[in-house]
Image (spheres, rainbow, N blue to C red):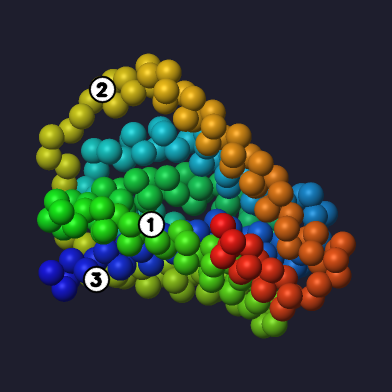
Amino acid sequence: MRKTSLTVLVLALGVFGIITTEMGMVGVLPQVSAELGVTPSAAGWLVGVFALVIAVSGPFTTLLASGIDRKKVLAAAIAVFAVSNAVYALTTQYEVMLAFRVVPALFHPVFFAVALATAARLVPAGDATRATATVFGGVTVGFAFGVPLTSYLAEHVSLASAFWFGALVNLIAFLGILRFVPSMPVGQRVSYGAQLSVLKQSKMWLTITSVVLVFAAMFSVYGYFAEYLGQVTHMDGTWVSAMLMARSASS
């Protein structure tokens, strides 16, 4: 039971690392814009393209990964996030950073889907809801602490240190997955056609449309939140970090 609990916590840490990588960019866009010598609108694409790739590719990458051992999928996905953060820390080229926003975005929905399914499978049926809630709690912690901390490090230490923090978190999660997640090969594989049949349901398309609209509204505002606070309200990095934390807590 103790090992199972550690496994669930490792998966939650992986979710935290992924959210910190995905949304941490929001808090450092002013520094990225200055460091890479690009306009704020161009830097904003580092957030927008991540969300766009997830929306377009998510159903298909998850489908393609459905027949692979879950441990291998989790380890590969989180390793991509660790490497991508290292690239952010080392590169001075906007095009390189943009490319390595696209690559991890392809693995983002795969990790989430597999991590939640794995957590539910590892525990008794009665504890499945608690296990999945614990894993999904990594999202809340990522927004509440990962994003503001990334912003704080970029302002008070260096932009590279903020990205190295993300790399370290994902690396620890990667090692934890190798150590604690058991091999979980797929037993009875469901055909692609059977999985895609869910798209025939009108309620599914209503849900998809609603989610797209909600997240489009959120990213269009939140993506430039740090830039707005710095340029319009003239807040320094400490206040920007505090406002990001307050915003996440209010959500």
Drawn side of residue 191 relative to residue 108, left or right: left
Closer-to-camera residue (232/130)? 130
**Label 1 near label 2: C-beta < 8 Å?**
no
Number of numbered discs on residues: 3
**Numbered disc in front, either 2 or 1:** 1
Closer-to-camera residue (197/175)? 197
| Mark 2 burial class by Cα count in 10 Å: few <14, some 14-19, many 20+ | few
Amino acid carrying mark 1 in the image: Phe
Closer-to-camera residue (74/151)? 151
Image position, residue 56 (x, y; %): 52, 33
- Element type where label 1 sits in the image: helix
The image quarter containing residue 245 is bottom right
Drawn side of residue 119 relative to residue 241, left or right: left
**Image quarter hosting the C terminus:** bottom right
Q: Which residue is mark 2?
A: 194
**Numbered disc in front, either 1 or 3:** 1
Drawn side of residue 52 relative to residue 204, left or right: right
Amino acid carrying mark 2 in the image: Ala
**Label 3 near label 2: C-beta < 8 Å?**
no
Picture residue at 34% right of the left edge, 46% below the top = 113
Residue 77 in view: yes
Amino acid carrying mark 3 in the image: Leu
| Mark 1 burial class by Cα count in 10 Å: few <14, some 14-19, many 20+ | some
- Element type where label 2 sits in the image: helix
Image position, residue 95 (x, y; %): 68, 51
Picture residue at 13% right of the left edge, 34% below the top = 188
Q: Which residue is mark 1?
A: 136
CA gap, disc 1 to disc 3? 15 Å
**Image quarter hosting the N terminus:** bottom left
Q: Which residue is mark 3?
A: 6
Picture residue at 22% right of the left edge, 48% below the top = 69
